[in-house]
Image (cartoon, grey):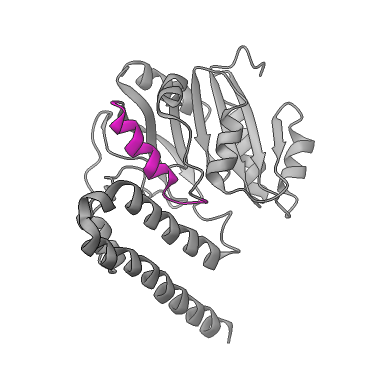
Amino acid sequence: MDRVAARVDVVVVNYNGGDLLSEAVAAVLASTVPVRLVLVDNASTDGSVEAAETRFPDVHFLHNSRNLGFAAAANRGMKEGDAEFVLLLNPDCLLQPDTLEQMLRVLEAHPEAGMAGCRILNPDGSEQRGCRRTLPSLASAAGKALGRQQAMDLHLQPLPDTPGHVEAISGAFMLLRRQAIDEVGLLDEGYFMHCEDLDWCRRFLDAGWKILFVPHVEVVHHQGHCSRALPLRVLWHKHRGMARYYRKFLAGRAGPFRSAVVLPSIYARFLFLAARDGLRRRVAGR
């Protein structure tokens, strides 16, 4: 679509997205809302971006010479557009033709909301963890660092009948007002991958914007499709992101003693899970 006519700038960050990348692009371009799609590739090596370029010549492609991580690549894509709304979309997340139309209708009816997320489904039809959740607190951060299950994710709670405010949504599908982005700022590029969406949600709320969860709009997310080849690296960046979020938003209230326990515990948890997962892979490979 022409850039001026686009109502939504859709930004997709790709890293070895495989065949699902072209499926996701095709689904975006089939939208009933005029869109401009910016695809930022983080130095993929699987041929996914070349296949998409051949099939979709009207898409705006940006090629990074190395993997910059999600936040930096997404920011580069968002700077390319000027539409009133921006959709951050994972390359393994599949829209329906009317997904954006429905979401825009809700977002426009809620001027207090700076971003909105929908109900994200696993391929088996179950609701995915993380599409509606609370922000980390001192208690939940400490509990997760020590390996205890925390009730941050709300996917097991009854589905609400109408759109409502939540503290956080998933970075796999984030529909945002450009005005709110201009006020709050772009993603924190200190995160490589994971937790940058929680950071952004926290900053939106701190700036006075609300966050909407829209239960009647659904998309399918093939979670982990782009990162399954590098599980240890993903696990490391997830814990590194947890530590960064804690230092930014929670450590000041926790005090030095509690932080001296929580932060090392985050990295100890990474070492434990890395060792456990490595053992499981060796056993499975026998």
Residue segment shown in magenta: 192-208
When the figure is inspected, residue 99 is found, relative to residue 135, above or below; the finding is above
Q: Which secondary structure class fits the magenta region best?
A: helix
When the figure is inspected, residue 215 is found, relative to residue 150, above or below; the finding is above
- Front residue (pair 122, 228): 228
User: Which residue is outermost to the right?
Assistant: 54
Q: Residue at 65% across / 36% down in the picture?
A: 39
Res 98 seen here: no
When the figure is inspected, residue 240 is found, relative to residue 80, above or below; the finding is below
Q: Residue at 29% across / 20% down in the picture?
A: 112
When the figure is inspected, residue 43 is found, relative to residue 101, above or below; the finding is below
User: Which quarter of the rendering shows the C terminus?
Assistant: bottom right
Give the x, y percent position of residue 153.
Answer: 29, 50
Answer with left or right where residue 157 lies relative to residue 195. left
Q: Is residue 155 magenta?
A: no
> In which quarter of the view is residue 138 placed?
bottom left
Q: Residue at 39% across / 68% down in the picture?
A: 267
Give the x, y percent position of residue 48.
Answer: 71, 48
Give the x, y percent position of residue 65.
Answer: 73, 47
> In which quarter of the view is residue 169 placed?
top left
Q: Is residue 200 magenta?
A: yes
- Front residue (pair 202, 275): 202
Answer with left or right where residue 164 lies relative to residue 269. left
Q: Residue at 45% across / 51% down in the picture?
A: 194
Res 168 seen here: yes
